[in-house]
Image (cartoon, rainbow, N blue to C red):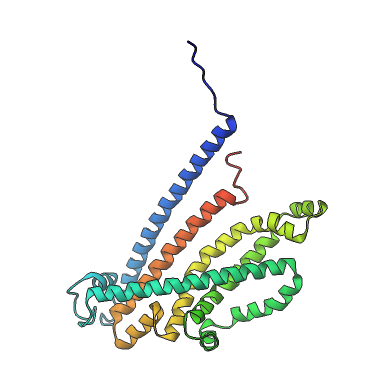
Amino acid sequence: MTATTTAAPAGEVTSTAGGAETTRALLRRTGRAGVTIVIALVVLALLWQVLLLVFDVSSFVGKSPHNVVQYLFSDDPPRGVRPASMSAEQARADSFGALGTTLLNALIGFVAGMVVATLVAIGFVLWKPVEFAFMPIAMLLRSVPLVAMAPVLLLIFGQGKLGIAVIAAIVVLFPVLVNVVVGLNSAPPQSLDLITVNGGSALTALVKVRIPSALPEFLASVRISVPGAIVGSMLAEWLVGFAGMGGVLSGYKGSGNYGGVWTIVALAVIASIVLYELATLLEAAALTRWGPNAGLSSG
């Protein structure tokens, strides 16, 4: 009896090897992102503690990272860390509940800002009159301080989620708009000429050439806009003063609950760092799969 061996096609072997290498690369990036988060938090905690000592901040007002942990988890914290009437369970419920509210508001504003900025950027590229009409408005939104503009926006759109989302969206809109316009205009001229020579329309060039070319800039915009959406939401919540981390922060400051104030700030910073790193991982995965150089490694 003669054994028969069937060799796998070379293309299939190459594709499998390339897929395994891509998976390993993404796992390495995930590990590095986790290490980056830990290092960033440790450095910030040390810097926080050092600045309290350097500026000799009163322990009544300035709370250390250890105090924040005591505020959230200790049943018997030192005096002044948490109001005597507030339990650790209530402190966690208020703080993490506010965090969840702010993240939801930031998500709504982030998505709205990304969608509007992307559509406007496409309009800039396809129809030049849109750029002439909209760019002065975008420049106005960029030049006027958000703190000055936010109260007016809340009067127009109300003090509910819509008003908060609008403010978060404005924080996101301008950097995304600029980056995506640059990305759409960076499409290779040869590819655009090829579409034109073959009778393709501007819309065809947009879908087949401009959007793939703009993917790195779009994903970079996602990464840098996530912390901005959180800050914008907290600002709106601070002015509204009802819910979310901004509203809770305002209430804690007014009542002298400085342990709660520092805890909210710490949660906001941690959430921003973690979401930034997650966006970085998303960017790396998307560029590996669909980016300009996606197929070179397995070629």
* Residue occupying image coordinates x 59% and y 68%: 115
Q: Residue furthest top?
A: 1
Residue 95 visible? The answer is: yes
Front residue of this view, candidates 102 and 21: 102
Q: Position of residue 238 (x, y in %)?
A: 42, 83
Q: Is 49 above or below relative to 256? A: above
* Residue occupying image coordinates x 32% and y 74%: 95
Q: Position of residue 278 (x, y in %)?
A: 45, 59
Q: Is 53 above or below relative to 283? A: below
Q: Residue furthest front?
A: 1
Q: Position of residue 110 (x, y in %)?
A: 52, 70
* Residue occupying image coordinates x 54% and y 32%: 13
Front residue of this view, candidates 41 and 55: 41
Q: Is 63 above or below relative to 45? A: below
Front residue of this view, candidates 99 and 147: 99
Q: Position of residue 210 (x, y in %)?
A: 69, 58
Q: How many marks?
A: 0
Front residue of this view, candidates 272 and 196: 196
Is 215 positioned to the left or the right of 284 in the image?
Answer: right
Residue 56 visible? The answer is: no
* Residue occupying image coordinates x 56% and y 64%: 221
Which image quarter: residue 113?
bottom right
Is 59 positioned to the left or the right of 251 in the image?
Answer: left
Q: Is 39 above or below relative to 95? A: above
Question: Which image quadrant: the C terminus?
Answer: top right
